Amino acid sequence: MSTALRRAVLAVTLLDDGTLAEVETLDIGVLIPRGPDAWPLCVPWGELVLAAGETSDDLPAESLQRRVARWMRLRLHIETLFGTADSRDAAHSKVLSLVRPRGVPVGHPMHPGAAWPRARVLGGALDVGLALRGLDDDGRPDPERTGLLPHGVLSAAGIDIASACARADRYLADMAELAAERLLRDTSAVLRPLGDADIPTLLASQRFREVLLDGQGMRSAAIPTLRRGWLDLGRLDPAFVPAAAALTDPDERGFPRPVLITADEVTLVREGGDIVRQSLADPVTDEHNHPVSRGA
């Protein structure tokens, strides 16, 4: 266990304004209080090493603290669900019902680390893992959000990973099919989330990518935020994407540069590449503001 990890745990206890402020550090791990009528939750140091990731010594202190705090809040949240359920099977089913898929751009500040992805979309720009409905990306309760969920948290809580992954796959297939149908009806070339799936998450579906291509071999897209994107970049100022990404809150940022999409890949345009040429490669209509026609 590294000194950086111990410092991160200490920083969390000093800076947190909630339950984690009462965390007690022991040789075997940390104790998180659960109220006067429940035993504290013990999280071993080995779990926190997983939370930090393999490159914990190279992470900025703030990023390491966020990963550790997220892990502890998630563990506490799941244990609370178990404590309020009628039976362990009911609690298990409850947790599984909240599991969602999540696509995260590689290099995103909220990426939980190398151990988080359960799949990587070809092209090297998009990782896919799990998330949990009802929490934000820091593990704090938020009924409108779907926060990142390292699968090691589920293992530590005794949740079957295979069942959780199957649940996430079904959800992504359902949302991608609905989003594909919407894309066929809506010719505005604007990408939007659907349900608990933001745009990078929808891009993790091959079905969605195939419909998005509209019969073309490759298509470019500007996705500077997680919840808004644009196709047909010939209509956009080439400087729009990096500028919009830079102005977006880092946690809500999407891809910092345009992406190239095929049925099998999502690739980030190389830094310093010819954005203008890639943009002009997209089809546009002769009439301004007239939507690009799509096949049925």
Image (cartoon, grey):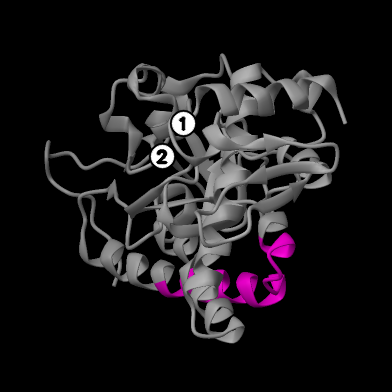
Q: Quadrant of residue 31?
A: top right
Of residue 193 and residue 164, the one placed in the foreground of this image is 164
Mark 2: few, some, or many residues within 10 Å (few <14, many ≥20)? Answer: many
- x%, y% of residue 206? 55, 63
Q: Amino acid at mark 2?
A: Ala
Mark 1: few, some, or many residues within 10 Å (few <14, many ≥20)? Answer: many
Kindly state the secondary structure of the residue where label 2 is placed: strand
Q: Marks 2 and 1, how far apart in space?
A: 6 Å
- x%, y% of residue 165? 63, 70
> Considering only vertical position in the picture, is 244 above or below 199?
above
Residue 251 included in the magenta stretch of the image: no
Q: Residue at x 52, y 57 (%)?
A: 77
Q: Quadrant of the N terminus?
A: top right
In the rendered structure, which disc, 2 or 1, sits on the residue that comes first in sequence? 2
- x%, y% of residue 107? 61, 30
- Residue 227 visible in the displayed image: yes
- Residue 205 visible in the displayed image: no
185 on left or right of 8: left
Q: Which residue is mark 2?
A: 221
Q: Are marks 2 and 1 in contact (CB under 8 Å)?
A: yes
Q: Quadrant of residue 168?
A: bottom right
Secondary structure mostly seen in magenta is helix
Q: Residue at x 56, y 32 (%)?
A: 108
> Considering only vertical position in the picture, is 241 above or below 219?
above
Q: Amino acid at mark 1?
A: Pro
Q: Which residue is mark 1?
A: 258
Of residue 246 and residue 153, the one placed in the foreground of this image is 153
